[in-house]
Image: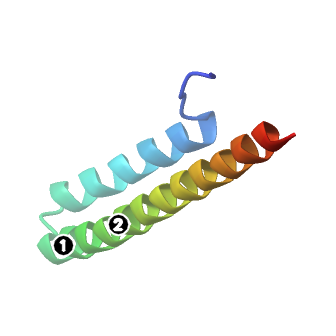
Amino acid sequence: MQPFVASPELQFREEATRRVLQELFDANDLQGLMDAAVLLNKLWIQQTAIARWLANEAAENLGEAWDASRLK
């Protein structure tokens, strides 16, 4: 199994987001911070749902492949 490592692109995105949030904080832009928090929460929920769906699909496909290989 390959280790889980965030790609450079994702690391860049993380840093860019951190900087935007820091700028909003430094400017005392509470509405901007709230808007960012709501958006980030929605994106987290979406990504979690996608990851769970993919895991379920992979498990189902592996189960079907296992069953098919045993019937041969």
Percent x, y of residue 33: 20, 67
Q: Name the image quarter holding residue 71.
A: top right
Residue depth check, mark 1 versus mark 2: number of the one nearer the observer: 2
Direction from residue 33 to residue 49 in the image, left or right = right
User: In percent of the image, x 36 and y 61: which residue is there?
Assistant: 44
Tell me how far mark 1 sits from mark 2, CA to CA: 17 Å
User: In percent of the image, x 87 and y 39: which residue is there?
Assistant: 72
Percent x, y of residue 36: 29, 69
Q: Which residue is mark 2?
A: 45
User: In percent of the image, x 45 and y 49: which residue is there?
Assistant: 16
Q: Nearer the viewer, residue 10 or 45?
A: 45
User: In percent of the image, x 62 and y 50: which residue is there?
Assistant: 58
Instruction: Specify the quadrant that holds the N terminus.
Output: top right
Direction from residue 64 to residue 45 in the image, left or right = left
Badge 2 marks a residue whose secondary structure is: helix
Q: Which residue is mark 1?
A: 34
Q: Nearer the viewer, residue 25 or 14?
A: 14
Residue sitting at the far front = 71
Percent x, y of residue 50: 50, 63
Q: Nearer the viewer, residue 39 or 2?
A: 2
Percent x, y of residue 17: 40, 53
Amino acid type at mark 2: Ile
- Label 1–label 2 contact, CB within 8 A: no
Colouring of the image: rainbow
Residue 17 in the image: above or below residue 27: above
Badge 1 marks a residue whose secondary structure is: helix
Amino acid type at mark 1: Met
Residue 70 in the image: above or below residue 64: above
Return the disc, 1 or 2, that comes first in the chain's sequence: 1
Q: Residues within 10 Å of mark 2 (few under 14, many from 20)?
A: few
Q: Residues within 10 Å of mark 1 (few under 14, many from 20)?
A: few
